[in-house]
Amino acid sequence: MPFVSPEVFAKQVVASIQGYAILSGRAVGNLFTRPRYWSDIYTQMDSIGVGSMPIVVLTGFFTGCVLALQSATSLEQFGAVGMTGNLVALSMVKELGPVLTGLMVSGRNASGMASELGSMKVTEQIDAMRALGTDPLRKLVTPRISATVFMLFFLTILSDAVGIAGGALVSVFLLGLNASAYFHNSYRSLVYADVVQGITKPLFFGFIIASVGCFYGMNTKGGTQGVGKATTQAVVVSSVFIIVIDFLISRTMIGIFGR
């Protein structure tokens, strides 16, 4: 990577932020005007949602299993092993479910969007779409953002469910806890504020994943090498954004609900 002066670097950062804001704003604005490419939205829902289910289920399940094992070891010191269900449910719903699902989908789909759009960019397919009178943002970006936000919401709920189920499996068969007590404690520990926090995060994460992936794909330069670079940047930037936004949402929700 060539070194540039601080002035040039600052200009590049500002230009990138400006380009990202314009792309995101236009893509969201396209939702409220016609034409709408419903077939593309459904195709992306299938690719992003159904295609990501196996890795989301596996990640959520084994995260719940590990949580139950680790928490039981710590709670045993205080004679509170029965509270394992509370800890697993709160951890999965409020934090680990949304974040891990977002990171998994980011690694799978942000890279896919960047490489797909980047390949179209360097082979001038996007320029051909403009020449034919089709808006590339409306055709390529808006469906991906809509589908990612919509499907990540349900993928997060699925991850939470299988994570709690994985914790139950470990708690019952390895730790010897009562299954009914585990699920009762899990249910009782969750309140309105926890559920709201858990289902709000994927809405922001989905937008970040799709918009960042599409931004780097639409701005790819330098042939096939540029496609690889855009793919890497999309995954890294979207993952960092997810972690930062997770902190900001958590802080906001704690300020609003007090937990």
Image (tube, rainbow, N blue to C red):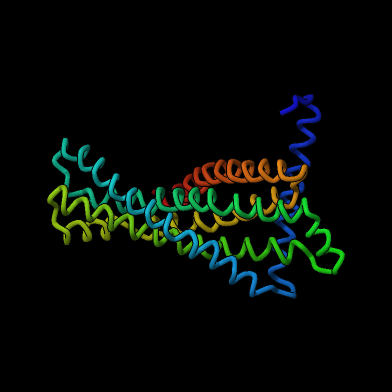
* Residue at 51 percent of width and 48 percent of height: 249
Q: In the shown orientation, is residue 67 left or right of residue 147?
A: left
Q: In the shown orientation, is residue 228 left or right of residue 90?
A: right
Quadrant of the image occupied by residue 182: bottom left
Q: Is residue 91 visible?
A: yes
Quadrant of the image occupied by residue 204: bottom right
* Residue at 78 percent of width and 59 percent of height: 125
Q: Is residue 208 visible?
A: no
Q: As rendered, which of 175 and 201 lies closer to the eye?
A: 175
* Residue at 32 percent of width and 57 percent of height: 190
Quarter placement of the N terminus: top right
Q: Is residue 64 above or below residue 77?
A: below
Q: As rendered, which of 129 and 86 lies closer to the eye?
A: 129
Percent x, y of residue 45:
55, 67
Percent x, y of residue 43:
59, 69
Percent x, y of residue 175:
15, 47
Q: Is residue 8 above or below residue 183?
A: above
Q: Is residue 108 above or below residue 14?
A: below
* Residue at 22 percent of width and 55 percent of height: 169
Q: As rendered, which of 258 and 242 lies closer to the eye?
A: 242
Q: Is residue 111 above or below residue 1?
A: below
Percent x, y of residue 223:
76, 45
Number of marks in the rendered image: 0
Q: In the shown orientation, is residue 185 left or right of residue 64?
A: left
Q: As rendered, which of 207 and 2 lies closer to the eye?
A: 2
